[in-house]
Image (cartoon, rainbow, N blue to C red):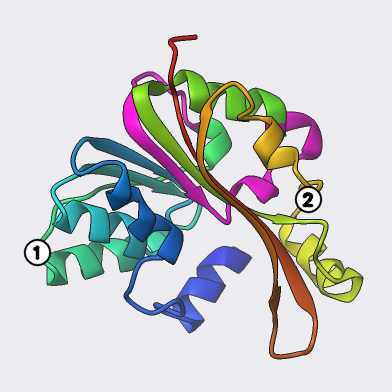
Amino acid sequence: MSDYNKFYKANKYNRGYEPNELVKDILKYKNQGKVLDLGCGEGQDIIFLAEKGFETIGIDLSNQAIDNLIKLANKRNVEVDARVMNITEYNFSEKFDVILSEASLHFLKEEEREDYIHKIKNSTNKNGINVLGVFDEGTSDELYEGMTHWGISLFRHNELFEYYSDWEILSKKSFEAAMDNGYKRGISQVIARKINEE
């Protein structure tokens, strides 16, 4: 059993049942459409969007997370297309109105990030939005040492925002979240709208 499956088996719905605040902000800009969630985990975010009427696809590496997602979606009586897949294996063969990735892109190798985000942008419909959150170098060194076990590579300050310099930035945040152990997790978040076809 992979570390991810062990985690989701031992910590079922560890994030609770509510969507991330960043995901709630989607409703300020979109009230319908097709959503892709890259690294959807147990699905709190896309289940929330499905309840709001969006058509949703979620992919995650952990089959345990996807199993938990399906059970939660069934309990909430919503339909979600949930797939077990590494985000790097997704072929981006269709376009979306919203592409969401909260706390997943920092699992990419640093040299993969620019090309991968280009694929995300290219697979977004005109006037569609990208909603991304990543861990950045504001993270405490001691905390980051533990993150390396999970294959995390921190984004540089402003790196995420620079990838969207050619889009309309609707919201951007860079902050440090205090952890219970006293360490800080650096976080960058962006919501950006595609204003021109690429």
Q: Magenta stretch: give its range.
A: 90-113
Q: What type is the residue that disc 2 sits on? A: Ser
On the picture, is 128 further left or further right than 105?
left
Q: Is residue 95 above or below residue 53?
A: above
Seen from the viewer's position, the closer of residues 58 and 120 is: 120
Rendering coords of residue 93 (x, y %): 38, 18
What residue sits 48% from the left and 18% below the top?
A: 122
Which of the pair 171/76 is nearer the observer? Answer: 171
Secondary structure at badge 1 equals loop
Q: Which image quarter is the N terminus in?
A: bottom right
Is residue 34 something one can see in this rendering? Answer: yes
Q: On screen, 53 above or below 184?
A: above
Q: Residue at x 9, y 64 (%)?
A: 77
Number of numbered markers: 2
Query: Is-magenta flag for residue 164?
Result: no
The residue carrying mark 1 is 77
Q: Is residue 163 shown left or right of residue 66? A: right
**For numbered disc 2, what is the local secondary structure?**
loop
Q: Amino acid at mark 1?
A: Asn
- Mark 2 to mark 1 CA distance (whole Å): 37 Å
Marks 2 and 1, the one that precedes in the sequence: 1
Residue 33 — which label? none
Q: Is residue 103 magenta?
A: yes
Which of these two is toward me, 170 or 129?
A: 170
Give the class, few, some or many, for how many residues have Cα within 10 Å of label 1's Cα (few <14, many ≥20). few
Mark 2 crowd level (few <14, some 14–19, many ≥20, 10 Å Cα) = some
The reply to whether residue 64 is visible in this rendering is: no
| Residue at the left extreme of this rendering | 77
Q: Position of residue 66 (x, y in %)?
A: 36, 58
Residue at mark 2: 153
Q: Looking at the picture, how far across and down is residue 6, in whole percent? A: 55, 73
Residue 181 in the figure: left or right of residue 88: right
